[in-house]
Image (spheres, coloured by chain):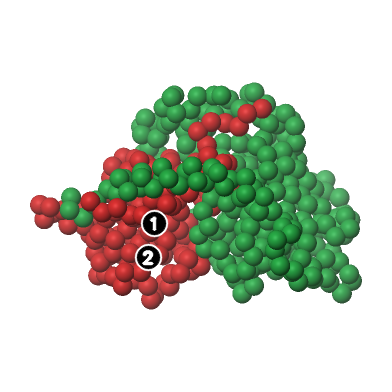
């Protein structure tokens, strides 16, 4: 096939060089964290007329300030500080799902996930709309919306389980703290890491200056995790960027393709020697 | 055989991301469920159709084989919302009949279908069209406890 030329040779050579280099610099990457003293001074955190921190704006999960970051590989929104401590049964399930190369991920069927995953996807902007008693987070990814009351009301008595859970917020000084419960079972928090309906997440949003909104999620699930799992991201203000319409069902060809692949699992399953538990 | 240095660096970065447990660039679905990182391809053909859609865009290329037969290839890439922010213009970047070169990774079933990572335009300009290999499929081994 004259039009087809594999470029494995060049790729393999450069990968061989790149990987060791990246491993060497990895600790430096992990330290590219909020408030790096080497960065120049930043504009002050905006405030609303009543003195609250003003979260309004369009952000991107990215460690880099400034313009939209179109193709930063790998690192979405700063360090993911710790791996989850999975219960043994959960770890076995995760391994099984990873062996299937995450073909079962609900996002392939256009279903949204909980805040920590939605917040970590670098390619799609996230808009915060703040009013005195309510904050709305609009994720371009899946056109998902979270409405977070901040007027002191509790979780509703009649909340039913949902993909993004039920959120109530409160201010702890300059930090917005959001308590999220009432999740559907089966939420993929990350590849192969699947929650139960006992999932409970405490999110903390701290806009430390005009550009940078720090995100921390403490994830608890007694059927998944041996101890709480903390995920941190950095959301960077992207002035001039707008949230567009993303209707995932428009042209989603994956389910039909997966139906064919699932008839031939050997096509995509990891072989046992690729996936030995440590 | 053409080598693709930019593409190769991208491959290395993807592997690094997978090894380090970094956050997903793009997670609509798993790369590895459909595409094979061990099957990189660079293909030149004539553009016959564009799907500028979500959750994926597609480029359709007619590719002439040595025996003269024409194979219709399909390249999957970013959703249209992302392409706007990756340097693409819906009406101005490519047009039907353009000769394009696309570097990416082929589907596991060896059909003429691939993830398109980078497109070389008739002008010689390169644009990213899709994500890195490995995106969204997770690590090989579950986290410890």
- Mark 2 falls on what kind of element? strand
The residue beneath circle 2 is B126
- Mark 1 falls on what kind of element? helix
Within the image, what quadrant is residue A192 found in?
A: top right
User: Mark 1, chain letter?
Assistant: B
Percent position of residue B37, x then y: 38, 43
Q: For chain B, what colour was chosen?
A: red
Mark sitting earlier along the chain (1/2): 1
User: Mark 2, chain letter?
Assistant: B
Marks 1 and 2: which is nearer the front?
A: 1
Where is A220 relative to B56, above or below? above
Question: Nearest the camera: A204 or A150?
Answer: A204
The answer, for residue A105, to whether it is visible in the render is no
In the rendered structure, the answer to whether residue A68 lies left or right of residue B1 reads: right
Within the image, what quadrant is residue A188 found in?
A: top right
Which chain is in green here?
Answer: A
Q: Give the residue drawn at x 68%, y 39%.
A: A82
In the rendered structure, the answer to whether residue A249 lies left or right of residue B120 reads: right
In the rendered image, the quadrant that contains the C terminus of chain A is: top right
Whether tag 1 and tag 2 are in contact, CB under 8 A, the answer is yes
The residue beneath circle 1 is B6
Q: Give the residue drawn at x 42%, y 31%.
A: A269
Within the image, what quadrant is residue A183 found in?
A: top right
């Amino acid at each position: 096939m004259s039009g087809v030329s594999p470029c494995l040779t060049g790729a393999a050579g450069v990968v061989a060089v790149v990987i060791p280099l990246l491993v060497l610099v990895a600790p430096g990457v992990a330290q590219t964290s909020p408030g790096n003293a080497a960065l120049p001074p930043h504009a002050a955190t905006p405030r609303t007329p009543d003195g609250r921190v003003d979260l309004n704006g369009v952000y991107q999960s990215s460690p880099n300030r400034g313009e939209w970051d179109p193709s930063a590989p790998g690192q979405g929104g700063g360090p993911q500080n710790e791996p989850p401590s999975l219960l043994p049964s959960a770890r076995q399930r995760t391994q099984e799902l990873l062996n299937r190369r995450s073909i079962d991920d609900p996002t392939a069927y256009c279903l949204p996930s909980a805040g920590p995953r939605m917040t970590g996807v670098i390619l799609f902007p996230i808009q915060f709309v703040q009013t005195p008693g309510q904050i709305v987070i609009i994720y371009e990814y899946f056109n998902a919306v979270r409405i977070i009351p901040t007027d002191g009301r509790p979780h509703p008595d009649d909340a039913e389980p949902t993909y993004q859970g039920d959120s109530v917020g409160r201010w702890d000084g300059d930090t917005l703290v959001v308590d999220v419960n009432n999740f559907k079972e089966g939420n993929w928090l990350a590849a192969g890491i699947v929650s139960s309906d006992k999932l409970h997440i405490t999110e903390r949003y701290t806009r430390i200056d005009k550009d940078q909104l720090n995100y921390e999620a403490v994830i608890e699930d007694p059927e998944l995790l041996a101890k709480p799992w903390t995920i941190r991201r950095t959301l960077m203000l992207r002035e001039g960027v707008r949230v567009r319409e993303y209707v995932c069902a428009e042209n989603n060809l994956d389910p039909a393709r997966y139906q064919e692949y699932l008839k031939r699992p050997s096509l995509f399953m990891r072989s046992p020697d690729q996936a030995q538990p440590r | 055989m053409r080598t693709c240095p930019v593409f190769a660096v991208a491959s290395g970065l993807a592997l690094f991301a997978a090894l380090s447990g970094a956050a997903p660039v793009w997670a609509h679905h798993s790369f590895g469920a459909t595409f094979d990182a061990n099957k990189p391809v660079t293909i030149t053909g004539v553009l016959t159709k564009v799907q500028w859609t979500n959750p994926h865009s597609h480029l359709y290329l007619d590719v002439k084989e040595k025996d003269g037969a024409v194979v219709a290839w399909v390249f999957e890439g970013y959703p249209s919302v992302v392409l706007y922010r990756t340097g693409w213009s819906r009406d101005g970047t490519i047009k039907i009949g353009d000769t394009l070169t696309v570097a990416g990774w082929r589907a596991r079933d060896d059909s003429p279908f691939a993830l398109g990572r980078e497109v070389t335009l008739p002008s010689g300009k390169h644009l990213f069209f899709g994500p890195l290999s490995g995106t969204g499929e997770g690590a090989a081994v579950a986290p410890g406890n």
